[in-house]
Image (cartoon, rainbow, N blue to C red):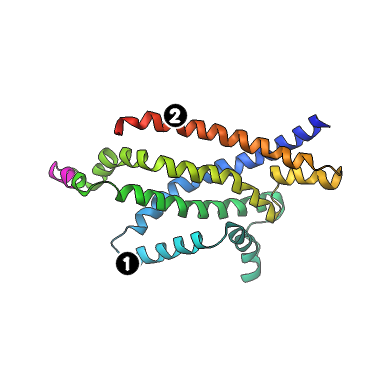
Amino acid sequence: MFLTVTASLLEGFLATVRLFALTLVFALPLGLVISFGSMSRFAALRLPIRFLIWVVRGTPLLLQLLIIYYGPGIIIKNNVWGSGDSGRFVAALVAFVINYACYFSEIYRGGIQSIPVGQYEAGQVLGLTRSQIFFRITLLQVIKRIVPPMSNEIITLVKDTSLARVIAVYEIIWSGQSFIKSAGIVWPLFYTGVFYLVFSGLLTMLFSRLENKLDYFR
């Protein structure tokens, strides 16, 4: 029975890892773009983006999942996500990407704005363009400063993937919970915690090593 449960949980865990990985692939660069927009000098661009960030950060991810998945069908009478498991997964991915991109954007913004203005001015004196200043002077310092808060958000993402089951996306919690109905046993649900602990522990070690490698900025 233990091997059967483990195999089932591994299948659900792979779906969890897939949602986690794809969210990072899309949310990390999108968050950087959003952060630039939120710092724009143009109010017509800055204000809507700041409003979006405020709404996303001020409402539960669970609610956002429900709105993004069911909203198109209710509002425009068209299920843009399609049917089946793939459609639900895409809807969940879109919700996670938008949510975490907004959180990442605030971390990026804080890191960029923490760099002393004098460094930008020194770069301009040397004749560097704004993009050269950012990539040659600012970027590595920003990475050093955002690693701790970014690691917290990424580890939180590992656990938040369990919320996807609200729109029937198959993941590890869904897999563990299914044994309550099918076999009348509850321990597989607690067993899922081991997978989360191991995954989070590996990420913690990875970010700890990354922080140590960036200590040359100290």
Q: Which residue is drawn at 35% across and 51% down?
A: 110
> Mark 2 or mark 1, which is nearer the start of the sequence?
1
- Residue at which label 2 appears: 209
Magenta segment, prevailing SS (helix, strand or loop): helix
* Amino acid at the residue labelled 2: Arg
- Mark 2 neighbour class, 10 Å CA radius: few under 14, some 14 to 19, many 20 or more: few
Q: What element carries label 1?
A: helix
The magenta stretch is 121-127
Front-most of residues 1 and 168: 1
Q: Is residue 123 left or right of residue 194?
A: left
Q: Is residue 110 left or right of residue 157?
A: left
Give how far across and how far down residue 120 sits, in percent: 21, 46
- Mark 1 neighbour class, 10 Å CA radius: few under 14, some 14 to 19, many 20 or more: few
Label 1 to label 2: alpha-carbon separation:
40 Å
Front-most of residues 178 and 194: 194
Q: Is mark 2 on a helix, strand or loop?
A: helix
Q: Residue at x 56, y 52 (%)?
A: 96
Give how far across and how far down residue 213 sits, in percent: 38, 28
Looking at the figure, which quarter contains the N terminus? top right
Q: Is residue 130 left or right of residue 100?
A: left
- Residue at which label 1 appears: 43
Q: In which quarter of the image is residue 15?
A: top right
* Amino acid at the residue labelled 1: Ala
Q: Which residue is drawn at 55% across and 46% down?
A: 156
Give how far across and how far down residue 215 sits, in percent: 34, 31
Above or below 50: residue 23 = above
Residue 9 belongs to the span the image colors magenta: no
